[in-house]
Image (tube, helix red, strand yellow):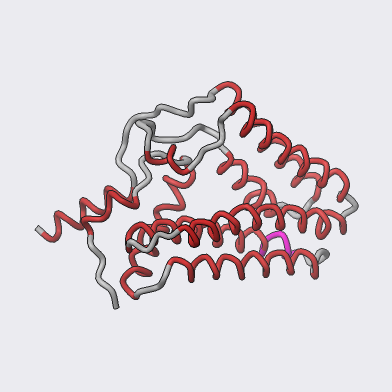
Amino acid sequence: MSSVDNSKESIYVKPCNAWTSTLFFYKLAVPLTRACAKIGIHPNVITVLRTLLAVSNVALLFLAPGWIFTPLCSSFIFAFSWLLDRVDGQLARLTGKTSKVGAFLDDVVDRGEKVLVLFAFAVGPMRYQGMMIPALVLILLHYGGHWFVNYHLGKLYNQDSFFQTDKKYLGFFTSFEECLVMLVVAPLFYNAYSILALWVLAMALFWVDSLVFPGGSNLPDEKSTFQKMGESADNTEK
């Protein structure tokens, strides 16, 4: 059992993040992060678990494309993996176990999981419903759009922007929200046309956010979930 130093709260708090992460995922990530720290789980263990979830998700989409519950299960697996993505970074900063290897592995899993699940979805359930080509075209447009935004608009967010900013949220529909709709919300609808329609909507909203609000949203400066819980813990100790 390892002790958790509440004085480190400010180290693993991200003052600026996607609003979906701040309002929803972090509310679950905070207690899970602290629980993992208390029992001594290493952040890389969480990353390995995310890798196993990604492999399981891809295998499910490939091997059971016609099962009516495949998209639903894929949605829940990805959502849980996404939650763990918040946990491993927070856990590394909270416990002081950050490393270049851990950061590299986390980045590989982040990028690889999304790519593999999207393409597995296209050649799995979408192919089963005769919509593989439209799905592949949208995926290529999706990554082409991100490449353009990243290298030509300078909009996508690096790690420093999470900490070196006075904004509360990165934007109203960032790549986080786009990913949420495409891989968590859309799969809840088994019909291929509904899924593709939600993909198009998510991509369109991402472009609106990137082109119209390139600086992100400067919303009221509220304390993050981490800060609120940290202050609550400090007041209890006093």
Q: Residue sitting at 52 percent across and 65 percent down?
A: 47
In the displayed structure, does residue 171 sit left or right of residue 13? right
Percent x, y of residue 76: 60, 61
User: Toward which corner of the image does residue 208 lie, by quadrant?
Assistant: top right
Q: Which is more toward the observer, 181 or 52?
A: 52
Q: Residue furthest top?
A: 212
In the displayed structure, does residue 43 sit left or right of residue 75? left
> Does residue 222 sit above or below 24 in this rendering?
above
User: Toward which corner of the image does residue 58 lie, by quadrant?
Assistant: bottom right
User: From this viewpoint, is residue 34 visible?
Assistant: yes
What secondary structure prevails in the magenta region?
A: helix
Percent x, y of residue 82: 54, 56
Percent x, y of residue 68: 77, 64
Q: Residue sitting at 34 percent across and 29 percent down?
A: 220
Q: In the picture, which quadrant includes the C terminus?
A: bottom left
User: Toward which corner of the image does residue 40 lie, by quadrant?
Assistant: bottom left
The stretch drawn in magenta includes residue 159: no
| Magenta-colored span | 68-73
Q: Residue sitting at 41 percent across and 70 percent down?
A: 42
Q: Residue sitting at 61 percent across and 70 percent down?
A: 52
> Does residue 20 sit above or below 59 in this rendering?
above
Q: In the picture, which quadrant includes the N terminus?
A: bottom left
Percent x, y of residue 13: 34, 48
In the displayed structure, does residue 106 sit left or right of residue 148? left
Q: Residue furthest right?
A: 130
